[in-house]
Amino acid sequence: EEKTSVDFIRAIIQEDNRTGKHDGRVHTRFPPEPNGYLHIGHAKSICLNFGIANENPGGLCNLRFDDTNPEKEDVEYVDSIKEDVRWLGFDWDDREYFASDYFDQLYKFAMTLIKKGKAYACDLPADKMREYRGTATEPGKPSPGRSRSVEENLDLFERMKNGEFKEGEFVLRAKIDLASPNFHMRDPVIYRVRHVHHHRTGDKWCIYPMYDYTHCISDSIEKITHSICTLEFEDHRPLYDWILDELEVFHPQQIEFARLNMTYTVMSKRKLLELVQGNFVSGWDDPRMPTICGMRRRGVTPEALREFCKTIGVTKFNSMTDKVVLENCIRDHLNQVAPRVMGVLNPLRVVIENYPEGTSEELDAVNNPNDESAGTRKVPFSKVIYIEKEDFMEDPPKKFFRLSPGKEVRLRYAYFVTCVDVIKDDAGEVIELRCTYDPETKGGNAPDGRKVKATIHWVSEAHAVDAEVRLYDHLFSTPDPEDLPEGEDYKTNLNPASLQVLTGCKLEPSLKSAKPGSRFQFERLGYFCVDSRDSTDETPVFNRTVTLRDTWAK
Ligand code: ATP
Ligand code: MG
Ligand code: MG
C-alpha cells in the first residue's frame, strides 16, 4: 500500500502493473545524446528513470546513447555521462546501448516501410520542402517523389546508402498525412545523407536516421515499457506510435513530463557549450555551471541532488524552480555530514599581549554537532592569531557585538579576549589588533558568569595553512537569463561578479591533508570543498559550495 501520493507517471505504472499490461515488467531508459556534459535537468530525468526501475521489483533502466548526430558527438561526452550517472548513484549493469548499434536494423526497418508504400525518397531541396509542407491553414503539397514506385524508392535508398548522393540531394521520408494538423505527421524526414565520420561506426555509414525515427525503434528493440521524455515531445508522440504500428513491433508507451528549469542559469547543452567554448567559464566542470561535474567539483553531494529531484517532483506543467530549493537540499545534507573547521578568509592579525611568548596549547573542538560519532579534534592556540577583518570595527554602530576597542568577545573553543589597541599603517588602515585574554575563560565560559554577545572564529598564525578560496555567486545576474528583449543575447546577463578569488586565507592545520573533493563546514562561512583540479599540497584551493542558512552570533 502506498503511504504517500505518487506522481502521475508512477500512477500510470502502478495501474499498468495492476492490469498486467506488460506482464508486470517495468523497463525504462535514460537516453542522452553524447553532445555535451549532463546538467541538473538530466539529473531529474536520471532520478526519474532509474528511480522508477529501482522501486519496482525486477525493474530495469537502460543507459542508451542517442548518437545519431555524428557532427556534434564525441566519446569524451560518452565517458563523462557514464561517470556522472554512476556518481549520482545509479547503475545500468551491462545494459549500455548505443542507437548507432541499431543502424543495420534501422536500415532494414526503413526498407520495410518502403516496401509497404509508407516511405519514399524525396529530392526536393530544403527550401522547397519547407514550402511544400504547408501552413496551419493550408495542407502540404505532395513532393514529386511521393508517387515513386516501391522499386524506385528501394533503389534510391540503396544508392543513398552507397554514397551516390551529396548531402541534401535525397532524403527518405515517411508517407503519412500532408493534411495533418500536426506538422510532424506531414511526411517527416526519417533518413538524411551525411558524409561524416561517426565516433563509433566510423565511415561505414553516410546516411543517418533522424531522432524521431530512431528513438521509438530503439525503445522497441530494447523492450522498454515506459518511454519517459520531456513535454516538447508530446507533439511527436503520434509519429512515435505511427512508426511502431506500421512496423508491427513491440510498442512502448511514451509519457511526457515537464523539464526542469531553474533560476539564474541556462540549461541547454548548446548554450553551456557556448559558455565553455567562449571561455566565459573555465570548462564544463566550472563550479558555477549547472552541470553535474561542475556541481560535483563545487562540493555538491549526490545525496543532495537526489533529494532535490525528489523535492521538485514530476508534473505536466512547465515552470521555473527557484535555485534556493537546490541550495537548501545541499545545506541540509552537508549540515549532516560535513566536519566543522575554522578558516579565516580575510585575515586580520591579532596579538594577545598577556599570552606567554613561544608557547602554544591544543584546544578541543567538536567535529560535528549533528553527529556525535564524528568526535573532536585538537586546534592549536597561541599568542598570535588571525580573525576575520569583518569581525572588527574601530567605530562600531550600536548593534555591532563583535570586536571593537574595549569590547570583549569569545574566541570559538578558546578564551574571551578584549581589544586593547589598534595598529594602523601609514594609510590609516587597520593592520593589527592588540588584545588581552582571560585565562579563566578557557573553553568559552567565564567562572564569574559574565557574558559576551559574540563568538568569532580564528586561526593560530604559527600553525595556519595558507590557502586560496573561491567564492561563487549566480552565473547570471537575472533570475531568467533567457527572458530578453528582441535581438539581445542571453550572455549579456552573465554576472561579472560570479567568481571571487581570495588568496592568503588562513586555515586551521587539520586541513593540511584534506583530500581533493573532501567537504567541510568553515564555521560561520559556509560549506567548502577541496578543488579537485587546481588544489596542490603547497596551496590548497577551496570552493565555497554554499553559504550557511544563517550565521550564528553575528
Ligand atoms: P539539452 O536541451 O540540454 O540539449 P536534451 O534534451 O537535448 O537537452 P538529451 O541528451 O537528449 O538532451 O537528454 C537526455 C534525457 O534527459 C532526455 O530524455 C531529456 O528529456 C532529459 N532532459 C534533458 N534536459 C532536461 C531537463 N531540463 N529536465 C528534465 N529532463 C531533461
Ligand atoms: Mg535530445
Ligand atoms: Mg539538445
Image (cartoon, helix red, strand yellow):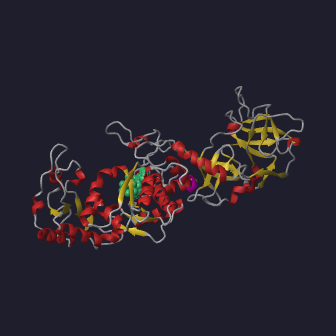
Asked if residue 181 lies left or right of residue 410, the reply is left
Residue name at image x 83 percent, y 51 percent: 360
Residue name at image x 63 percent, y 57 percent: 518
Image quadrant in which the N terminus is located: bottom right
Image quadrant in which the C terminus is located: top right
In the image, ligand 3 is in what quadrant?
bottom left
Depth order, front residue of 41/167: 41
Figure check: 316 above or below 375: above
Depth order, front residue of 83/233: 233
Q: Position of residue 282 (x, y in %)?
A: 48, 53
Among the 4 quarters of the image, the one containing residue 412: top right
Residue name at image x 14 percent, y 71 percent: 155
Residue 34 part of the magenta segment: no
Q: Position of residue 149 (x, y in %)?
A: 10, 67
Asked if residue 354 lies left or right of residue 208, the reply is right
Depth order, front residue of 35/362: 35
Residue pushed farthest front?
19
Asked if residue 362 lies left or right of residue 97, the reply is right
Residue 304 part of the magenta segment: yes
Q: Position of residue 352 (x, y in %)?
A: 82, 42
